[in-house]
Image (tube, helix red, strand yellow):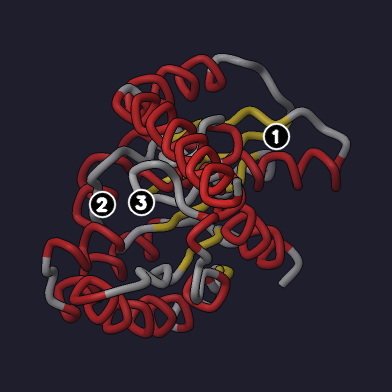
Amino acid sequence: MVRRGLGMLLLAVLAVWARGLAAAMTMEADHAAFWRRRARSPGTVTLVALGDSLAQGLGAIHPERSWAGRLAEAIEERTGSRVRVLVLGVCGAGVADVLRLQLPQVPAAALHGDPGTLIALEVGTNDASGGTDPEEYRRLLTEVCAALPAGSLVGDVPDLQRGRVRVAGARLSPVAREVVAAHPRLRLVRLEAATHRLAPWEFGPDLAHPNGLGYRRFGRAFTAALGS
């Protein structure tokens, strides 16, 4: 009876994982469409989210559980204002893409310190996996940070958990902290510390991105930076 029960439990877990994996196959397009719709929703405050797939929330079934969505929620709770969210982060983006493709899409008023806009950035996971040299990462991130207005939130590189990619991310993360420190008008988001040792149940069905529970750590880090 015990063996049969364990077998049924294993089948149930596999079924849930299979459904999640099937959802992950369309997640990139679905999440991008969600954020395009959300960008058209008005708000008295605008959050501009730069970066990669983590801004879109890949891995979470509900895209609003991404760090961008959780940060917007925290701002709404603090201010009582509706937040318009403009997610410019895209899957596979590195720091070069933020500089050359995403920054030009940021509303000019936001880059000039519009008090009704907050810019937040997280980038580096794809630079780690793609082998970006730390000094090249420093140069490009310095250009990005120089273009951001005072008060913008900039994250270091999340803990990438295992293997060669984790080692590469651990080399880039202190570089990000050094660059932000050189721009004291910006606010550092300590993502590496926040995401240290994610538990297996905090990953999405692709086993690479966080799920809604994992993104809770990202959201807390961004929210903590708001008060710094």
N-terminal-most mark, 1 or 2: 1
Closer to the camera in the image, 69 or 26: 26
Question: Residue 108: where, in percent of width, then height?
Answer: 44, 36
Q: Nearer the viewer, mark 2 or mark 3?
A: 3
The amino acid marked with disc number 3 is Leu
Question: Residue 178: where, in percent of width, then height?
Answer: 40, 85
Q: Nearer the viewer, mark 1 or mark 3?
A: 3
User: Which residue is tagged 2?
Assistant: 99
What secondary structure is marked by label 2?
A: helix
Q: Residues within 10 Å of mark 1 (few under 14, many from 20)?
A: many
User: In the visual, does 104 lie left or right of 20?
Assistant: left
Q: Quadrant of the C terminus?
A: bottom right
Closer to the camera in the image, 70 or 205: 205
Q: Residues within 10 Å of mark 2 (few under 14, many from 20)?
A: some
Where residue 53 sits, quadrant-wise, is top left
Is 32 drawn above or below residue 107 in the view shown?
A: above
Question: Residues under labels 1 and 3: Cα distance?
Answer: 34 Å
Q: Residues within 10 Å of mark 3 (few under 14, many from 20)?
A: few
The amino acid marked with disc number 1 is Val
The amino acid marked with disc number 2 is Leu
Residue 207 numbered tag? 3
Where residue 41 sits, quadrant-wise, is top right
User: Which residue is tagged 1?
Assistant: 45
What secondary structure is marked by label 1?
A: strand
Question: Residue 35: where, in percent of width, then height?
Answer: 48, 24
Question: Residues under labels 2 and 3: Cα distance?
Answer: 28 Å
User: In the visual, does 202 lie left or right of 17?
Assistant: right
Residue at 28%, 64% in the rendered image: 143
Question: Residues under labels 1 and 2: Cα distance?
Answer: 24 Å
N-terminal-most mark, 2 or 3: 2
- Determine if residue 15 is in view: yes
